[in-house]
Image (cartoon, grey):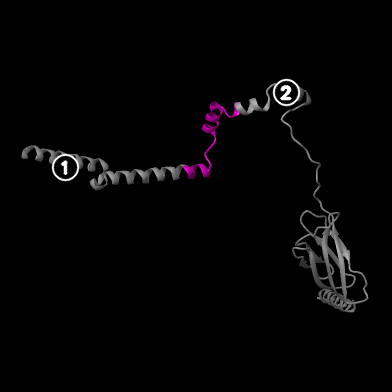
Amino acid sequence: MKLLVSIFLISSFTFFFSASHAQERKIVQYSGIVTTVGSGLPVGYATVTNLSFRNEAFAANNEGYFSFVAHVGDTIRFTSVGFDPLVVTIPEVKGDKYTANIVMQNLVTELPMVTPYPWASIEEFNIAFMNLDVSEDNIVRVRRSLSYESLAAMAAVIPRDGNEMRSINNAQSFNTMNNKVINQRYANPLLNPFAWGNLIQQITKGSKSRKTSNY
């Protein structure tokens, strides 16, 4: 029982001492911008943790800006995905505000540019280069590409695009409407020129027959 009381008293004394010591330390508005080494680009949404005050965590905005209240001498840790964690200590300042420029190291390593080639070795490239046919000029190659056989082969494997399909649909719709108009025109005898021709011929023959019968 005495041991438990002693532990409780020691813990309480430590807590009150830490609290009083924290109150004695100066409070500042700790602000800053988190950027990357070299490029100076902002590190968006970096996590800022105060290790000296209950691991209180904050988040920078999309431009890397952060601001919160802390004590002078607090240890601050900056972490972000793809960056090396950084730990800093708030120094002594004259006023009640401190602005820091936090620069984090990028863990991503940029490799030099590589250009792939279809040849596995320089020997295969030399063989392909020596067998390259350069006897034909541009006009001959264009004529061969625009020949009926080449166009037919490309038309068999290349799908039609939207403009071509729209043109075909418009042409089909026009032909369908034109056929309907023609069929309707010839279905009506008043609009059929052949029917008018037959009527005129019948009237002419009837007039001639009447004149013959009168004589």
Which sits in the foreground, 12 or 77? Answer: 77
In the rendered view of the protein, which quadrant contains the C terminus? Answer: top left
- For image coordinates 52% across by 29% down, the residue present is 152
Q: Is residue 157 magenta?
A: yes
Q: Is residue 6 above or below residue 112?
A: below
* Residue 119 x, y percent position in the rendering: 73, 28
Q: Is residue 42 above or below residue 12?
A: above
Which sits in the foreground, 26 or 104? Answer: 104
Q: Which mark is residue 128?
A: 2
Q: Is residue 29 above or below residue 61?
A: below
Which residue reaches farthest front?
215
Main structural element of the magenta stretch: helix, strand or loop?
helix
Question: What range of the chain is rendered magenta?
Answer: 144-167
Identify which amino acid the numbered label 1 is placed on.
Answer: Ile
- For image coordinates 74% across by 32% down, the residue present is 117
* Residue 137 x, y percent position in the rendering: 68, 25
